[in-house]
Image: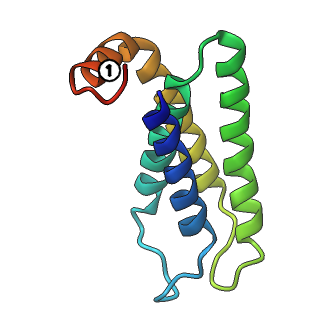
Amino acid sequence: MKIIKASFFLFLIVVTYYSLKSPDSGDLPANDKVGHFLAYFVLAGNLFLICDSLFQRQNALLFLVLYGLSMEFIQSYIPGRDASLLDIIANSSGTLLGLGFIYVFQGKILKLLRALKLIS
């Protein structure tokens, strides 16, 4: 499970960096909502895989939703960026669907990771 924990924290750093950096061209692409959704889907998938109980998953869900909200709030103070309700919806949707995906496919995913010798 160390590799899953490491990938979660690495991806959290990447998402934080891209959430807080000033845009290079001044305009973000129109499809950045897809990026928000996918980023939080992957974050949620990684985090929910390492959760052992419903309580931990509830806390993980709360953490990711609050994290997404805080990133949007902080963006309102970054030149060239602004907070967006659509980004919050994309972040939260990615988180919820990531949780649902892991809930349905956790056994198969863990079996695959064991077969690839990524976890024991």
Count of residue discs: 1
Q: Is residue 108 left or right of residue 23?
A: left
Q: Which residue is mark 1?
A: 109
- The x and y percentages for residue 28 are 47, 75
Q: Residue at x 44, y 62 (%)?
A: 32
Q: Residue at x 59, y 54 (%)?
A: 86
Q: Residue at x 66, y 29 (%)?
A: 61
Q: Is residue 109 above or below residue 78?
A: above
Q: Count residues near mark 1 (Cα–Cα under 10 Å), then give few for <14, some for 14-19, many for 20+.
A: few
The one of 107 and 62 positioned closer to us in this rendering: 107
- The x and y percentages for residue 80 are 63, 84
Q: Is residue 65 left or right of residue 14?
A: right
- The x and y percentages for residue 104 are 40, 12
Q: Is residue 64 above or below residue 12?
A: above
Q: Is residue 92 left or right of residue 66?
A: left
The one of 86 and 103 positioned closer to us in this rendering: 103
Q: Is residue 87 left or right of residue 103?
A: right
> The disc labelled 1 sits on which kind of residue?
Ile
- The x and y percentages for residue 7 are 46, 44
Q: Quadrant of the rendered structure where residue 21 is? A: bottom right
Secondary-structure class at tag 1: helix
Q: Residue at x 77, y 62 (%)?
A: 73
Q: Quadrant where the C terminus lies?
A: top left
The colour mode here is rainbow
Q: Residue furthest bottom?
A: 25
Q: Is residue 94 above or below residue 75?
A: above
